[in-house]
Image (spheres, grey):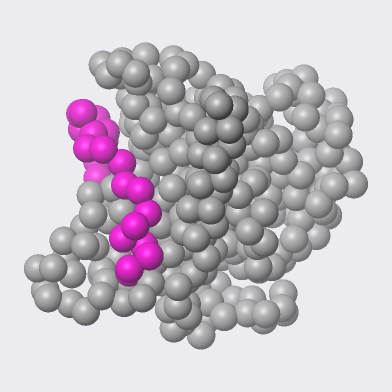
Amino acid sequence: MKTLLASVWSSFLTTLLLASTSFAADPVKNPDADAKTEAEMKNYKQVIPGTEVSYEMVSIKGGEFLLGSPASEADRKEDEGPQAKVKIEPFWMGKYEVTWDEYDIWSYNLDIQRRKLLNLAISDLDKVADGVTRPTKPYTDMTFGMGHDGYPAICMTQLAAKTYCEWLSQKTGHYYRLPTEAEWEYACRAGTTTAYSFGDDKSKLGDYGWCFDNSDEKYHPVGKKKPNPWGLYDMHGNVSEWCVDGYTADAYKAFAGKTSPLVPATKLYPRIVRGGSWDDDPDELRSAKRHFSTKEWKQQDPQVPKSKWYMTDALHVGFRSVRPLKPATEDEKLKLNLAPEANIERD
C-alpha cells in the first residue's frame, strides 16, 4: 500500500510540475529576445512584467571547449580534471548576478501586491506565475547589512534559485533555468584557456572581480568591475553562483564528447557553485575552480527541520540564470529545473 501511495504521489507531482512548466500564453513581446537560430540571437533587456525592474541577457554562441584545468595550472585541484572536450549548445546568460531587486519580486509577492494596489489587469502569464511556489518569510535580514538595491541576492538554497527561474519562466513565457556546470565554465572562459578569463596573472584580478583581497569583507553592487570577453560581469568573484549540478570529484571522467553534460543533483549535499566570491582568495576565483555546498551553510538556521529556502551561512552564494536557445522538452525541464526527487531540501 505504501509503495502504491508513493507511486501515485510521485505521478501527481510530475503531472503538477509538467503543468507548471508549460506556458499558458505567448511570451512577452520583446523583438530582441526572439530568435529561432543562433545567427538571430541578440543581447536583450527585459522588464519583468507588471514591474519596473529589468534584467539583461547576453547571447552565448555554441561551441566546444576543454572543461577543467590542465595539470600545469597553478593552484589546480585534483577535481578539476581530467580535462574533457564537451559541446555546448547556444544559450543566453544573465549579464549580471540576479539582484535583490529582481529576487524580492518573487520571494515577497511584490508583483501580486503591485497589481492589486494599482488595479492592474492580470495576464494569462500572471495567472500561471502566481501559482509558482514562493518561499516562507526569511527569519533574519538575508543581506546581513551588506547592501540591497543593485546588490546580488544571496543565502538561497539551490531549490530557491531554481524556483525563481521557474517563476521567471512563467512570468515571461521564456524558459529560464540555472546553468549546468559545463555551461557556466564555458561562459566564464569566454573562449580563453588561461586560469582566468583575462589571463594567468592573478595580480590583475582586482580589475575584474571582488575577492577577499579587495572586498572589504562584503559583497558589492553587480557590474562594477570589468566584464569578461563575452560581456558577462562578476564571473570571477563577488558571489559564487549556483549551477544545476550535484558535485562528484571525478565527474569529468565521463564528460568527454558529451553535450552540456551534468551530474544530476540527487542528494542534498554537495551541489555545485562556481566563480568564487568576495570571501575567497584569488586562486579560488579561477575559471576551472569547483566549489560545492555543505551542511555548514545552514549552521545558524534556528528552524527544525532547517529551511528548504534559505542558507543563513551562505553569505557568499548567489546565482544567475540562463535561457537555452533550443526549446527544452518536458523531460529536460524535469531533469534540469524542478525534478521532485531532487528537491528534498532538509537536513
Residue 112, relative to residue 286: is it above or below?
Answer: below
Tell me, yes or no, if residue 241 can be seen here.
no
Q: Horizontal and vertical percent for residue 149?
A: 25, 51
- Residue at figure coordinates x 39%, y 30% from the top left: 308
Q: In this orientation, which residue lies closer to the viewer: 147 or 31?
A: 31
Which quadrant would the N terminus be assigned to in this image? Answer: top right
Residue at 26% across, 69% down: 51
Query: Quadrant of the rendered structure where residue 119 is?
Result: bottom left
Give whichever of 291, 7 is nearer the camera.
7
Is 76 left or right of 84, judged from the image as shown?
A: left
Where residue 268 appears, as percent x and y from the top left, is 54, 25
Quarter of the image for residue 80 reads top right
Q: How many marks?
A: 0
**Identity of the residue drawn at 51% across and 19% down:** 294
Q: Nearer the viewer, residue 21 or 36?
A: 21
User: Looking at the image, which is closer to me, 31 or 161?
Assistant: 161
Q: Residue at x 24, y 62 (%)?
A: 111
Residue 252 location in percent, x, y?
81, 32
44 falls in the magenta region: no
- Most extreme residue toward the left, as rendered? 117
Report the quarter where the C terminus lies: top left
Residue at the front extreme? 1
In the figure, 229 relative to 84: above or below? Answer: below
On the image, the x and y values in percent for residue 148 come to: 24, 45
Magenta span: chief secondary structure: loop
Stretch of the chain drawn in magenta: 126-149
Q: Is 220 positioned to the left or the right of 15 in the image?
A: left
In the figure, 110 relative to 334: above or below?
below
Q: Where is 51 relative to 16, above or below?
A: below
Q: Is residue 129 visible?
A: yes
